[in-house]
Each structure stands twice: as structure tokens, then as C-alpha cells.
Image (tube, grey):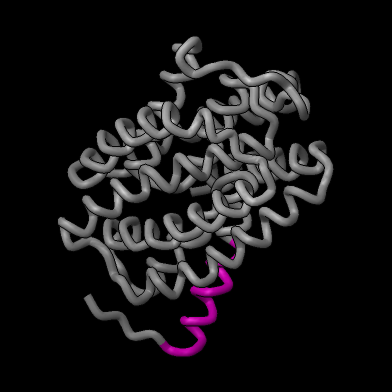
Amino acid sequence: MIYELTLPLILILVFAGIAGGFINTLAGGGSMLTVPVLLMLGMPADVANGTNRIGVLFQSIAGVKGFRDHDKLDTSAVTPVLIIALAGALVGSLAASYFPVAWLEYALLGAMVGMAVAMIVRPDVVMPDEGSIPKQLAKSPGAAGGLFLAAAYGGFVQAGVGFLLIAALAGGLRYDLVRTNALKLVCTAAFSVIALAVFVVRDQVAWIPGLILAIGTVTGSMLSVRFAIKVEQRTIKRFLLVMVLAAAAGALLI
């Protein structure tokens, strides 16, 4: 698949990637910026969905490295989280190749609205304080189930999955938001590999636009990690709330 890429379109891809990478690393919903840009190139929805995974994969790898370098990644939780995330992503990515994305729109909207209400009414439920002692995944079946469903959605369609992962990791396992985002990126990296492989097999990936987008998403992710490390926890909470409300409002308007 070959798409004509002029300099203005390349710049739009890169800057959309920077914004999307920053937002995805710190909260979620960045793909709601990047996928429309890919559609603007004339890609079918399934190809735009598959191509977007290139940017998400590289962004996630860059973010995980950044958080690990700052000792904000709970390495003991990586393996159990990966097992659940990979299983969910495989189910979701296979479903994505055969069923319309619109089937999940109302479910995602409901989840985002519910999360926004919880963040306003009972913020401690979704966003534990910094230094909170996290639960073990093996001893939290509810959190494990929520993580599987979030990963399945991520395998199905990338847009908005960060919010669901944050709800599972912060709300279910009680990680603070910095460590939540570190583990969230482990999840997105894992199911992006699975999802991208499925889309490649089905010839639903445009590599050149995807790699250009990845230049932006990696840059945005690196900037986001530096921001998350420097600011107070409450600043991240406010940013997350704004992004949840913006994503929910955007979904309502579509």
C-alpha cells in the first residue's frame, strides 16, 4: 500500500504523533488524534487502525525504558501483567479483523463516563495516593479480569485503551499514577506486538506512514515521561481527568 506523502502531511503526521505519544504515555486517548490523521491520508479504517499500532508500539517501548531508567517500573509485576495482557490482546486483535469497531463504542463511552464520575466524586477509588502499597495480581481476580478486558479492547482498537488500563492498574491494583503509567505502557507494548502481527498478516499496515508517525510518538513519549517524573501526583491526576472528560465529550459528539 503506497500513499502520497507531501511535506505538509509528513509534518502533520509527526506533530500528531508527538501529541498522541505524550497523551498516551501520561493518560490515554492519543490515538483519537493519530487515527484521524491516518484516515486523512485516504486509508481505510482497518488499515489506519493497523498502521497506528506502529506508532503505539514504539511509543510504548520508549516510555517503558524512560520509566525504568527513573526506577518507576515495578519489574516484579511485569510478567503476570504481560501474561494477562497478551491473552486479552490476542482475543481482541482477532476480533478486530472480523467485527466492526462501532460495536465497542458505547461500551468505551460508558467506561469513560463512569471513570470521569468516579474521579470527581471518589478520586481515591481510581487514583490512589503516591506511595500506596499495590496489590498482587494473583490475589486480585477482579483486577485481573479488568486488565484482561482492557487488553482485549486494546487488541480490538487502540483509541481510549489507556483509560481502561489505568482503571485496572490504579483502581484495581492500587498503583500510583506514575507506576500505573509505566505498567500501562508494558501492556500496550505487549498487545501492540500481537495486534500488529495480526494486521500485518492481513495486509492492513502502511509501513512508511506508520514509521513517520512513530518518530513523533517516541518523541512525545519521552517528553511525557520527563513531565511525569518532575510534576506532583495531583498534576497528573488533573491532566488525566481533563483527558477523560475530553475523550468522553469527543465520543459523545461523534
Q: From the viewer's perspective, is 45 left or right of 58?
A: left
Q: Residue at x 21, y 41 (%)?
A: 94
Quarter of the image for residue 49 reads: bottom left
Task: Say whether residue 235 is magenta.
Answer: no
Figure check: 5 above or below 192: below
Location of residue 5 (image quadrant): bottom left
What's drawn in magenta, residue-wise? 6-19
Q: Depth check: give the residue in front, 35 or 176.
A: 176
Q: Is residue 156 left or right of residue 121?
A: left
Magenta-colored stretch includes residue 14: yes
Seen as rendered, the residue at the extreme bottom is: 7
- Residue 238: give x, y in percent of width and height: 77, 40
**For residue 115, which quarter of the picture?**
top right
Q: Residue 167, relative to residue 242: is it above or below?
A: above
| Rendered view: 66 above or below 146 | below
Q: Main secondary structure of the magenta part?
A: helix
Image location (x, y in percent) of residue 7: 48, 89
Q: Which residue is drawn at 40% across and 34% down?
A: 82
Q: In which quarter of the image is the N terminus?
A: bottom left
> Which residue occupies 39% across, 41% down?
154
Q: In this view, does 96 lie to the left or right of 164?
A: left
Horizontal side of residue 87 vs 118, given as left or right: left
Give the residue displayed 77% in from the left and 25% down from the top.
129
